Each structure stands twice: as C-alpha cells, then as structure tokens.
Amino acid sequence: MSKRTSLWAWAALTAGQLLIAAAADGQSVSFLARHDYRVGGDTESVVAADFNGDGVPDLAVANGHAVSVLLNNADGTFQLPRDFDAGGDPAFLAVGDFNGDDVLDLAVSNPNGAEVWVLLGLGDGSFQPAQNVHLGGRPWSVAVGDFDGDGVLDLAVGDGLASTLSLLLGNGDGTFQAPRSIVAGSRPRWIAVADFNGDGWLDLAVANYDTNEVSILLGVGGGDFLSARSFAAGSQPSCVTVGDFNGDGVPDLALTAQASGEVSILLGNGDGSFQARRSFRVGRYPWSLAVGDFNGDGRLDLAVANWTDISTSVLLGNGDGTFQEARSFPPGSYSVAVGDLNGDGVPDLATAGGGVVSVLPGNGDGTFLETPTFRAGGAPLSVTLGDFNGDAILDLAVANFDSDNVSVLLGNGDGSFREPSSFGVGNHPSSVAVGDFNGDGWLDLAVANVSSHDVSLLLGRGDGTFLPARSLAASGFPQSVAVGDFNGDGWLDLVVATGVADYNVLVMLGNGDGSFQTARAFRAGHDPRSVVVGDFNGDAIPDLAVANYGSSDVSVLLGNGDGSFQPARTFLADLAPQCVAVGDFNGDGRLDLAVADLYADRISIVLGIGDGTFRAGQDLSVGPRPFFVTVGDFNRDGFADLAVLNVYSDVSVLLGDGNGRFQTGRLFGVGRFPNAAAVGDFNGDGWPDLVVPEDDGVSVLINNTPP
C-alpha cells in the first residue's frame, strides 16, 4: 500500500467512519432483526389484543409502574408506548369487555396494593381512569370468564401468598361485586379457564407454586365451584394454560415447572380429571407460556418465556400430546403473547422482560426471525472490518477476551461469513483496529490486550491469514486502540487508551515496516476507556478524543503534527463515559463527538466549534447502560446517525436530522450482552449494515430500510 493510500485510510477515520451514501429520501430505518420497544420498569406481563378497533392486535404491558399500550402500525411495528395509571405495582394483565360496549378493557393485578384495577377502553387505544377493587393478600394472575352464566364477564384472581383465589362477579357496567374467596392450593400463582368436563360451565385450573400441583375447580353455575381436586404438575408450577394438544377435542393443560426447567403436559380425560403429567425440557426458570400453531400443521405448539436463560423456547407439537425438542430464540422474558402482529397470517411472538417488549415475527415453519449469528471465540469484545483476502468483500476481525485470540471471518458477499480462523494474541484482548502497518498493500491488525499490558500486531498475508503476533510494550490495562498518521510521515501510527488506574494515552509511531517506536505517554483523564481520531481544529493534523471513565469527562488532545500532542483540554461528560465516537452531526463541516455514558443511560452530543473546543449539544435518552456508540448513515439521507449498544440485548438506532439533533431510538434485538459494533455493507446492496459481537458470537444486522 502506498503512502497516499495510507493517508486516505486515515482520512476515512477522521470522517468518523461514516458510510454516507448519495442522499435518499426517508426518515425511517429497519434491519432484519427483532424489534424491541422500551417501556421501562419490571415488565411482568404482555397481552396482544385490538384496543383501537382497527382490526390488528396491539400490545399492553404491565411494567411495574403503569400499564403501557403500544398501538400497532398494521405492519408489525408499534407506536411509542402510552402509559396508564394502574396502581403502584401493576403486574399481570387480562383482557375482556367488562361493560358490554364491544370495546376491549383491561384488568390488572396490583400485588403490593392488594388490589385489582380495571381500565375501561375508549375504543381508540386509550382508557378511562382505572377503578380499583381491594382484595387483600397478594393478588397475582387474573383470569376472565362468565362463571355464573349471566352473559357478563367475571374475574378470578390468584393470591401469591395465600391458599385461596378471589372470584369477582361482573355487574356488566365495568364494576364488580365484592370478592368471594375460594380455596385452591398453596400460593395459587396462575389461573386458566376452560370447560374441563363438558357440562357447559366454565372450570378453573390453578397452578399452586408451593405444593407442585394444579388444582381443578369444576364450575356448577351461579359462580359456584366444587372442591378442588389436585394433580401433580412439576416443581414450582408458575403458569398454566389450556389447549387441545392431542387432537381429541378435550382441553389439556400445559404448565411451567420453574425449578426443573420443564413444561408439564397433562392430557384431559373429558370428565375434569387428567392423565399423569409428561415433561419436556425448556430453558432455565420458565416463567410463563402461550399456545399457537407456529408451523401451520394444525397442531398446537408452545412458546415458553425463560427468565434466567434469556431465551424463549418454542416446542412444536406432534399432535399426540408430545412435543419436539425445544428450540430457543432470544430474548428471555417474564411473559410471552401470541398474535399475528404483522398481518401475514402467521402467528408472531411478543415477549416482555427487563423493561423491554420484543416482537419476534414468525416465519411460518415454527421458527422466528433471528438476527444471524456467526461463531467467533470466547467472549467476543471488539470488531473491525476490512478486506483481508483481497476479494473486494468486507471481512470481520473479532477480539475474543476470554480465548486470547482474534477470529477472522471472511465475508461471502451476501451478508454471511465463513467459519472463523483464529490467531493468538496477548491476554484478554479488548480492542482491535485495522491498517496497513508495513506498506505491503495488505491489511494488518493491532490488538489492545488488557492483562498482558501490551499491543499485539498481526501482519496480514493478503489471503485472510496473518503472521504470528508481535508484542508491542504498553502500560496500564490497554482498553482501546485506534489508528492515524500522527507525525505526517505517511506511515500509520497507533494510539492506546490505557484504562483502569491510569491517566494516559500511549502513542506508538510506526516505522512503515511493521515495527513501532517506543510508546510515548500523553496525559488524558483517569481511567481512559475509549480513544478516537479526528481533526478537531481544522489544521489537517489528526487529534485525539478520549472518554475517561474514572474522571467522568472527555479529553481532547490536539496534535502538533510531529507525533506529539498539546496538553489535554477537558470537557465534562457525565457519570461514567464509556465510549466516544466522532462525526459531523450538524453539517457545519466540523467534527463533533457522541459520548456513551454507562450510568446516566444516555448519549451526550458535544458539538465542535472548529478550534478544538466543543459546546454542549443534545442529550439522548437511550435506555439502560449504553456501552458503545458508533456512527453511520443508516437511512442514506446524507446525515450522520448513531447506533448505540445497551449492555443487555439490543442496539438502538437514532436517526440524525443533520442539525445536531436525533430522533428517538429504534431498538433492534441482538444476542446477549452486546459489546461493540461496526458499520459496513456486508451484502453489497449499498446500504450500511451492522455487526455486533455479543455473548454467543457475532450478530449481523442486514439493513432492509425501504428505499
């Protein structure tokens, strides 16, 4: 690679690594990934129903402080949530028309308030102020049915602490009679409703958490029930639902067994009794389940929300009461609901947990839309892009923190990647950067290693393989590495943020042959975590911006052009700046900064003045624990956008307007614990895609924004 080409590579970095295409109309963005919606709180229950009468199911979520309603746009995407008060601790939802106006209403339990709240729908997706009914105890799940045969819906409410459930007979106007107590079993957590003995009266199935049983209470009309009869249901049953799983026309039961990570199936005999349970493995701590025909074979299947597994298990039914081996889809949740959310005639899933509602479109074959994930090494932490084998297709290089290596995944040009090749580096690699460090025209890699306190250099052979790593001595606990030509000699140099218990960035000047001069330290702030390169004062000399986690600020070091830097200028960020990215966000030709603050739950925009100083811009709320931010033009309107990773399982894309402001983020699901991101066109369609290293590998989000 020539000096001119090396300088061009640095110029691309100073432009913020944007993929700015020819401007195209459009203020939307979409990726082939599940869509997530942040509602906040402890999302314990989600239901799908049509609350505004447009014929498509909407979502309602009990989130621990309110009931959030997300109206469907009729394409499987949803409007921003609107919150309705339902007491101090809304937990579990049920849907019905409680006042006979042909508009759906909501009933929600409030465990800490010992109440049930009823929200009467107005037919436009909004609700009247909630009315509450005091029950005592700790109300848990709510079930709906006409238990006294008067044509009016009633409520049955489980008690999470006692051995009874409460029956509230409806008056037909949205109010209810005083609750009646019915003996069930110990800690009746969940209630399902069906006619189990075929006598025309609704019966109850109650999951009793403490006694590992399901109680059957047969209705006899008038709101009365026979004494409970119990059947073994597995260890700590938390949820029960009804379906005909063997096709005999008799309702059967499915229950989650939390302690054993199983689903229990009890086939009904048609007389109110049930056969001995059969168990099927799912994930850890299954919390709730729902029924649907996910593969269109006419047999009922199950979807199970696994809380600690961070997954949703899908069990396809065989039609005889047995199920195929569970297949898991992220994310995990407390609750799962089924509905055709995008109008394609195929059932989809909505899950709720961790303050997020996730929508998983069904494929019609029993699978659900997944972000493609490709295997890397142990705990992939950082990713960079380049054409490592000279085929003009983007490849990936991934730093794997636990396995002490870099995985190289060669691209196929269609958004997929080949099996990884691994190359050893130092201990606990945390960051990887790309450049031609020896001038041979082939891309090389530089890797910052936290625990061996060095930088590994992998020189590329041009065929996707690399020479054995060379170690460059550093100091501190290297967290981040970036590339630029800091002394103007045409050769690429390195800068390293040294991390915990240090205050420096290290500059290593390249000799052009793959070797580097001894590192020189320049003081930044305490615990520098992230460093980027850009020309912040317009003198055509690369400068540095550093996110300092320990001192809660951002340092800007202006370059002198000889490989040295002026004393750092400090700009206050917030509580814990974890990552900094660079781009021109307001279209004035001057580089700006976006800073991810780990504990303030936001991105701070700092606008460049053009002389190396900055002024405060917009603070962007992005949800819990923003860990990483990068820049791209994801809707190809010519303006810089942001992609932000939250520590748990999603990436938020915020579209810029070219004036330094950004729209509310749109959430797209990835795997567990995403760590970083890079932007590139992986399938050759001219649209910028995203690649995200996460707990299970590398997720690739293909951009499918409508032109």
Image (cartoon, rainbow, N blue to C red):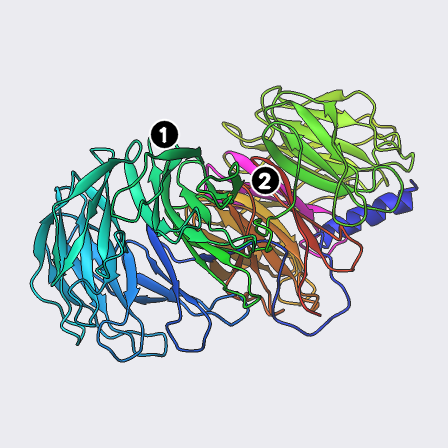
Q: What residue would you read off at disc 1?
A: 260
Residue 596 left/right relative to 99:
right
Quadrant assignment, res 588: bottom right
Give percent across and percent down for residue 297. Answer: 56, 53
User: Can the viewer see residue 567 in this picture?
Assistant: no
The front one of 483 and 677 is 677
Residue 338 left/right relative to 287:
right
The image quadrant where one finds the C terminus is bottom right
The front one of 674 and 316 is 316
> How busy is the neighbourhood of tag 2: few (under 14 within 10 Å), some, or many (20 plus)?
many
Q: Nearer the viewer, mark 1 or mark 2?
A: 1
Query: What amino acid is labelled 1 in the image?
Result: Ser
Give percent across and percent down for residue 517. Answer: 77, 26
Query: What amino acid is labelled 2 in the image?
Result: Ser
| Helix, strand or loop for disc 2 | strand
Q: Give the distance between the C-alpha atoms of the residues marked 1 and 2, in whole angstroms.
A: 43 Å
| Helix, strand or loop for disc 1 | loop
Sequence-wise, the earlier of marks 1 and 2 is 1
Quadrant assignment, res 26: bottom right
**What range is drawn magenta here?**
527-554
- Is residue 637 depicted above or below 193 in this figure? below
- Is residue 681 depicted above or below 307 in this figure? below
The image quadrant where one finds the N terminus is top right
**Disc 1 + disc 2, Cβ < 8 Å:** no
Picture residue at 48% right of the left edge, 59% below the top? 620
User: Can the viewer see residue 244 in this picture?
Assistant: yes
Give percent across and percent down for residue 218. Answer: 18, 51
Give percent across and percent down for residue 124. Answer: 36, 79
Disc ID at residue 530:
2
